[in-house]
Image: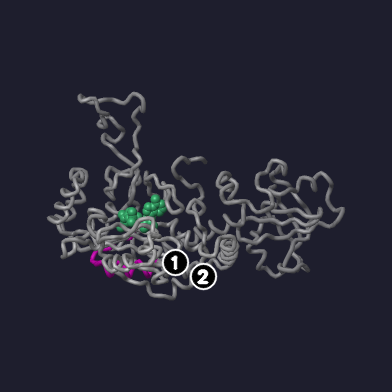
Amino acid sequence: MKRTKIKELLYTAAASQLVVVQGWVRTFRNGQFISINDGSCLENIQAVIELNSLDEATLKRITTGSCVSITGELIPSPAKGQTVELKVEQVEILGDCDPEKYPLQPKKHSLEFLREIAHLRSRTSTFGAVMRVRHAMAFAVHKFFNDRGFVYVHTPVITGSDAEGAGEMFRVTNLHAKNPPLDEHGNVNFKEDFFGRETNLTVSGQLEGETYALALSEIYTFGPTFRAENSNTTRHLAEFWMIEPEMAFYDIHDNMKLATDLLQFLVKYALENCQQDLEFLHKRAQEEDAAKPQDKRNELGLLERLKFVTENEFQKLSYTEAIDILRNSTPNKKKKFHYLIDQWGDDLQSEHERFLVEKHFKKPVILYNYPKEIKSFYMRQNEDGKTVAAMDVLFPGIGEIIGGSQREERYDNLIARIKELNLPEKDLWWYIELRKFGSAPHSGFGLGFERLILFVTGMTNIRDVIPFPRYPGNAEF
Ligand code: 4AD
Ligand code: MG
């Protein structure tokens, strides 16, 4: 007989039909009640063994963590909180699990501990819920763009350019670490490297994405990106996934509109399609919140926060207006900010972004027109000579969730900025050429996928919303 997924069984009307369930034992009580989970949904199914119907040896092997295949009758359940259960006819142990040695006991474990056993944390309710939501969000991203006629472009993971010009890259090489070939000046000779040049893991697919936007009009990338920034925070990973749409004939305002539509669509999709997992995560976050001091707690619960985003306009605000608000804010005057804001041109830290979103406006904020000095070389220069058409979308609890801009499509302006910043013009030759051959106004942005998942799941550490997090000092698994 073929197995049926638990998700399907729980919504099947029980009519004493014989079914097969396969999954992992969560708990086994009183030598009678087995709770089984197969990850198809949050819920377990209960299988009930009639007394004296199984031999002792088999009963002993039904332990938390073991993998079982159970054949039984699906019957209406007399127990509270479940509509059906299995009346066991046969139990086959597919994989034993020594309860003395199994690290996942049927009790609450800390997220820190679970990070150390990332190969097993997938078996917990929390990680099951988070990863099902993550999957739904990946699917919804493709749905959103596909429905609008965007083309999914696979940009390279290994590249020769530094898209952000920030130099936070992981080198890719097959040269011998101890004994690399040297040139006549005694420097490492990368001409002898695999690609005949220096290469690194991509920090963003944007620059390559632009080449396809200037041909197919509307494209997006969705892939892993890598940053060797030493940020040991709850919002940074060294390897994260990014969604980067790039659109010809969009100005900065069209760009903001698309970003808003995308975020609202994704959150709405989660609310409509991940109800059970979100309700579980909502309760989980509530319990976590209750353990925090009053002033660190969320004003709204997870589900309220999600609905809030789908129902409210995002607040648009220029950088200049934001600086005025921040300079005159109470935490700035009382020197409560870690970094005080004292003049136009100061870069915004996460504490400032969160103040604007969570305390001042109490809704998502889109900041735009930033000083050119604190933004990337490719952003379109505004008429004032001081700012660029950049935009960041700021979310409650997260800070920056999206960064983007209108691109500098004017050849002379782009070259001037590259020279000003001393960037390697020779590596960017092809990017510059796009401005020579049929240039067009265009815009795009990057949505950090894990930051999105943090927001939607209400988890508080980015290391808990990706299966195997990569961060300074950690690449286990
Ligand atoms: O603001 P960023 O650096 O922008 C870019 O990379 C542009 N090339 C995007 C574009 O215009 N196509 O990164 C975009 C987003 C951030 O807003 C944040 O959500 C996420 O990527 N992000 C990170 N997420 C996790 N860990 C990190 N270290 C991240 N760095 C950026
Ligand atoms: Mg940014």
Find numbered disc 1 in the image and state the secondary structure of the residue it sits on. helix
For label 2, being within 8 Å of ligand 1 is answered no
Q: Amino acid at mark 1?
A: Leu
> Does mark 1 have its CB less than 8 Å from ligand 1?
no
Above or below residue 372? Residue 194 is: above
Ranked by sequence position, the earlier of labels 1 and 2 is 1
Q: Is residue 211 visible?
A: no
The three-letter code of the residue at mark 2 reads Leu
What label does residue 12 carry, if any? none
What's drawn in magenta, residue-wise? Answer: 244-262
Of labels 1 and 2, the one closer to you: 2
Say which element carries label 2.
loop
Q: Residue at x 46, y 40 (%)?
A: 473
Residue 304 is situated, as x and y percent measured from the top left of the image, at: 51, 72
Left or right: where does residue 147 sit relative to residue 34? left
Q: Nearer the viewer, residue 231 or 401?
A: 231
Which quadrant does ligand 2 occupy? Answer: bottom left
In the image as oriented, which residue stretches furthest toward the front?
334
Place of residue 387 in the rendered image (x, y in percent of width and height, measured from the top left) = 21, 62
Q: Which residue is mark 1?
A: 266
Q: Which residue in the structure is indicated by mark 2?
A: 300
Quick one: 437 or 367, which is closer to the camera? 367
Compute the Cα span from label 1 to label 2. 19 Å
360, above or below 141, in the image: below
Label 1 neighbour load within 10 Å: few <14, some 14-19, many 20+: many
- Given the current orientation, which residue lies at the most extreme right position? 52
Residue at 59% from the left image edge and 49% from the top image edge: 121
Q: Position of residue 430 (x, y in %)?
A: 20, 48
Residue 259 painted magenta:
yes
Say few, some or many: other residues with alpha carbon within 10 Å of mark 2 (under 14 / 14 to 19 / 20 or more).
few
